[in-house]
Image (cartoon, rainbow, N blue to C red):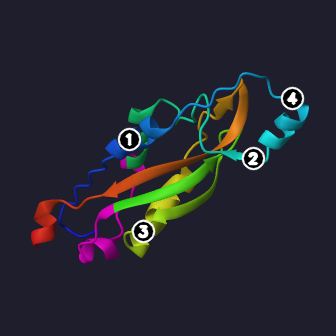
Amino acid sequence: MKKTILTLLIVLCPVFTFASGYTHVTSTKSMNVSEKNDSAVHVFDTAEQMPSFPGGNQALLNYLYRNIRYPEAAVSQGKQGRVIVSFIVESDGSITEASIKQSVYPSLDKEALRLINKMPKWIPGKINGQNVRVCFSLPVEFRLNSEIQRQ
């Protein structure tokens, strides 16, 4: 890596914005057997208990900070911004079908996908006490240190 020190600031305040925008799904009836089978296939946008990273939001921030590798191609071109990645948290907590919903720059997009696909299992979402598949969006913020940008 170059001699310059790259300071990376990951800002995930929008995570809280996305999470607070979700409405909780409540049901007045229990899922019957056919609905339980359907919930294994169906992907929910919201759930009574939304999926969460083990250890909470601070643990998620720590994971991203420790594992992110700012691509040199993006550094050399001064590229930065927020990549939004959408993925499914499966009923067992695994992450599948990660895709870019808001692109910034190809190498930043690729790094955001790498981070998401490498994540440990999440605590799955639940409806009526049953684990369900839930779609989740996560913004990953890439910021260069202002000293590096001026060089």
Q: Which residues are magenta?
A: 65-81
Decide if residue 125 is on the left or right side of residue 40.
left
The percent position of residue 49, horizontal first and vertical second, equals: 59, 28
Q: Which mark is residue 32?
A: 4
Q: Position of residue 112 (x, y in %)?
A: 45, 60
For label 4, count other residues whose C-alpha is less than 10 Å away and answer few (under 14), some (14-19) or many (20+): few
Q: Nearer the viewer, residue 1 or 51?
A: 51
Q: Are marks 1 and 4 in contact (CB under 8 Å)?
A: no
Say if residue 68 shows up in the picture. Answer: yes
Query: Which residue does the numbered mark 2 point to in the structure image?
Result: 42
Q: Could you say which is closer to the camera, residue 1 or residue 81?
A: 81
**Residue at 23% over, 73% down:** 78
Measure the C-alpha gap from mark 1 to mark 4.
Answer: 33 Å
* Amino acid carrying mark 3 in the image: Ser
State which tag comes first along the sequence, 2 or 1: 1
Identify which amino acid the numbered label 4 is placed on. Answer: Asn
The percent coordinates of residue 111 (x first, y second) are: 45, 64
**Which residue was labeled with disc 3?**
103
Q: What is the CA distance from the residue labelled 2 to the residue labelled 1?
A: 25 Å
Task: Confirm whether the magenta stretch covers residue 5.
Answer: no
Identify the mark nearer the N-term, 3 or 1.
Answer: 1
Q: CA distance from mark 3 to mark 2?
A: 26 Å
Amino acid type, mark 2: His
Look at discs 3 and 1 and give the one toward the viewer.
1
Q: Which residue is mark 1?
A: 17
N-terminal-most mark, 4 or 2? 4
Q: Is residue 66 left or right of residue 126?
A: left
Earlier sequence position, callout 3 versus callout 4: 4
